[in-house]
Amino acid sequence: MDDFNYKKYIAEGRLLKEAVDAPKAIILAGAPGAGKGYILKGLDLGGLKVMNIDSIFVDMLKQANVSLDLKNATPEERSIQAKSMSDANKQFKGNIVDIIAGKESFILDGTAASVKNTVKLKDELEEAGYEVFMLYVYTDLERSLRQNQDRFEKSDGEDRSLPPAIVLRTWNSVTKNYEPYKNLFGNNFVSVANTLEDEKLSDLEAIVDKYLTPFRPTNTKPKDDKAKARSAKAKAQLDSELNALLADGGVKDIIDTSVSKEEAQSKIKAFING
């Protein structure tokens, strides 16, 4: 009878345990106002810790005695907001580093507006032994802008409303990222569409007039000719991308391949327990 290979058995057993016990990370992707929090509340995510930079950012603004109605901010308030966001980012990154070092499973509740940063994060998590999943939440541009616009008032001043121009740019980035993320995460990807049920605007000019024009920043620093040219070029590119996404069929694939909350729950549960 062959000798039993205890070392091999122990090694294989350890690898199996490590695979079963591998920490999990779920990255949320979605524009401001997409309803990521609403979707999360409807899912059983096994008690995973939810990490969100907004909680740090909002606390810093409150400590600085700055209104969370960021869409109506003064130049001085915008300056404080920018510094607060920079400080919040540093603290948040430190918190994420601590969680990864402790091999804790967690949910990263953000926008995932940057493919480059998301790819880097995914690579770092996997190198640290994590299994990584993405929950993508899509919503219409108008719903994103409407939800953001109403957030401050509906929360009685306890939650922030971002400048709508930031929401517009973020929605564009996140929506363009759908296919890259679907390809990047493969089977560890699921999308949910949280769209308007009533009639919505699809004309970019009408959307801008309704949601951006009333909140255009005032008393801004004048731009030189080079800065004006860069701004005009960036705006033209953004408008072109937005018009393509707002056109018939522009986001049809996202909506058609999205699933119900129940289906998303089933896939996420399988990931967490796998």
Image (cartoon, helix red, strand yellow):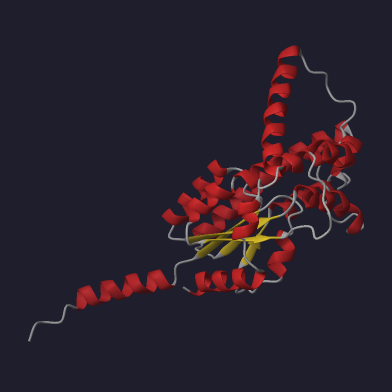
Answer with the quarter of the image where residue 233 lies: top right
**What residue occupies the far left of the structure in this picture?**
1
In this view of the protein, can residue 90 be seen by the observer? Answer: no
* Quadrant of res 1: bottom left
Taking 191 as reference, is 124 above or below it? above
Residue at image coords 28%, 73%: 12
Residue found at the very far bottom of the displayed protein? 1
Query: What residue sits 75% from the left and 41% below the top?
Result: 168
On screen, residue 216 above or below 167: above
**Residue drawn at x 59%, y 46% as measured from the top left:** 177
Up the image or down, 36 lies above or below 86; here it is below
Q: Residue at x 67, y 36 (%)?
A: 241
Q: Position of residue 52 (x, y in %)?
A: 68, 56
Left or right: where does residue 94 sit relative to residue 183? right
Residue extending furthest toward the top: 225
Q: Residue furthest front?
A: 248
Q: Going by the image, does 70 lie left or right of 32?
A: right
Residue 21 seen anywhere in this rendered image of the structure = yes
Q: Is residue 248 left or right of residue 157?
A: left
In percent of width and height, residue 141 lies at 76, 47
Horizontal and vertical percent for residue 136?
A: 62, 57
Q: Position of residue 109 (x, y in %)?
A: 66, 57
The quarter of the picture where residue 39 lies is bottom right
How many numbered discs sit on the rendered protein?
0
In the figure, 113 relative to 44: above or below? above
